[in-house]
Amino acid sequence: MLDLRNVLSPIESANGLPNACYTSDEMYRHEQESLFTNNWAAIGFGKDIAKPGMVKPVTFLGIPMLLVRTRDGHINVFQNVCRHRGMILVDTPQQLRGPITCPYHAWSYDLEGTLRSTPHVGGPGIDTIDSLDHCDYPLITVRSHVWRDIIFVNVGGDAPDFEIAADSLVSRWREFDQPVFHGGTDSSIIFTLDCNWKLAVENYCEAYHLPFIHPALNTYSRLEDHYNILDDGGFAGQGTTVYQPQITDDGRHFPRFAALSDKWEKGAEYVALFPNVLLGVHNDHAFAILLTPEGTGRTVEQVEIYYADEAACDDGYADMRRTNTEMWRTVFTEDVSVVEGMQRGRSANGYDGGKFSAVMDKPTHHFHKWVAQELSV
Ligand code: FES
Ligand SMILES: [Fe+2]
């Protein structure tokens, strides 16, 4: 086990996480078994299973899972495996018309996971058998919670309820606790990054790189307009005090979230909720970025942009949505070279985890401490 005590030191004397945390398969597995299993981690979005009966298979921590939208509209997450002979139940996202039916011997489960039918289980034409009580073989439920359309799971099952675990951020953004509406196909961006997932979190947390990596953004949202956010409730990031909502030449703007306080007139915040969600809130839109680790040096980054009112998702706002998506695509594309460059840098065996700026790197240090603590339990 790596000695991570120095990561936990005060920022003035701490080092960052050592190279092995970014390059070692053993550390990657340890992360999967600890911080991803023990906490609430994100695995998808409700908008991807928007209608009752829609299902989507995903793999998380190597476990095949199935996201399910039920008839009454709530979301269930199951392990995507049949209780009979262990066949994968669903291979591709789809709209089901009936139950979840196994392609092998046609055992079927309703959308709540209850085993409903087992054709020929007792012999040809006999669909029941005394030795199998359907109640005893439901789909295996994965503990899940949906917040801001993000589907979280706690695979280990022992984390506090999501509302308690994430209380600090939920409370901080209580004013945004209102419906969000995904902008549609023009409001999604996917990147595949050649870097460890943690580098995407670290880069997102800090504003220090703004003048150097985001020169256009920096012309109106300068370094001095940003503040650090650190919270022992498992998140860190930064905020700005000069957010300017998009206004078209003919004066149109997106509908705004209702009843926001003055802080949000020009304020916006960007926070990484550990381990793997990056969030942004503004008075007229929000986004969520799901980081899915695919090995030590590869991460899929799924950006989804949401609006305050269904009307903003109509054709009438298509030009504005596209402008907004392209603005964020530009910013996040600018970040790719640094997160991938830091990953390559982790192969320099003389690098000791790095020296923090005691002023500018506080959110990054906060995240490193969280990781070190989670890896040490
Ligand atoms: S494995 Fe699913 S019905 Fe046999
Ligand atoms: Fe950036």
Image (cartoon, rainbow, N blue to C red):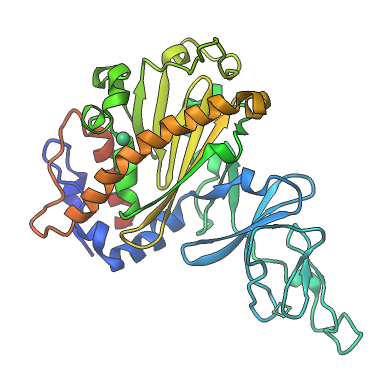
- Rendered position, 95 above or below 119: above
Q: Residue at x 54, y 10 (%)?
A: 251
**Residue 170 seen anywhere in this rendered image of the structure:** no
Instruction: Please say if 24 is above or below 181.
Output: below
Q: Residue at x 36, y 24 (%)?
A: 239
The single residue placed furthest to the left in the displayed view is 350
**Where is 112 relative to 191, above or below?**
below
- Residue 236 image point, x, y percent: 35, 35
Between 375 and 152, which is closer to the camera in this rendering? Answer: 152
Specify the quadrant that holds the C terminus.
bottom left
Asked if residue 212 can be seen in this view, the reply is yes
Q: Position of residue 112 (x, y in %)?
A: 75, 57
* Coordinates of residue 260 in the picture (x, y in percent): 54, 15
Total numbered labels: 0
Q: Residue at x 11, y 40 (%)?
A: 13
Give the quadrant of ligand 2: top left
Farthest right residue in view: 125
Q: Quadrant of residue 99?
A: bottom right
Decide which of 366, 337 is in the foreground and name it: 337
Q: Give the residue drawn at x 67%, y 53%.
A: 76
The reply, left or right, for residue 81 in relation to residue 24 is right
55 to the left or right of 252: right
Identify the image quadrant of the N terminus.
bottom left
**Which percent across, then down, holds residue 132?**
79, 80
Q: Nearer the viewer, residue 337 or 249?
A: 249
Q: Quadrant of residue 376?
A: bottom left
**Is residue 220 depicted above or below 191 in this figure?**
above
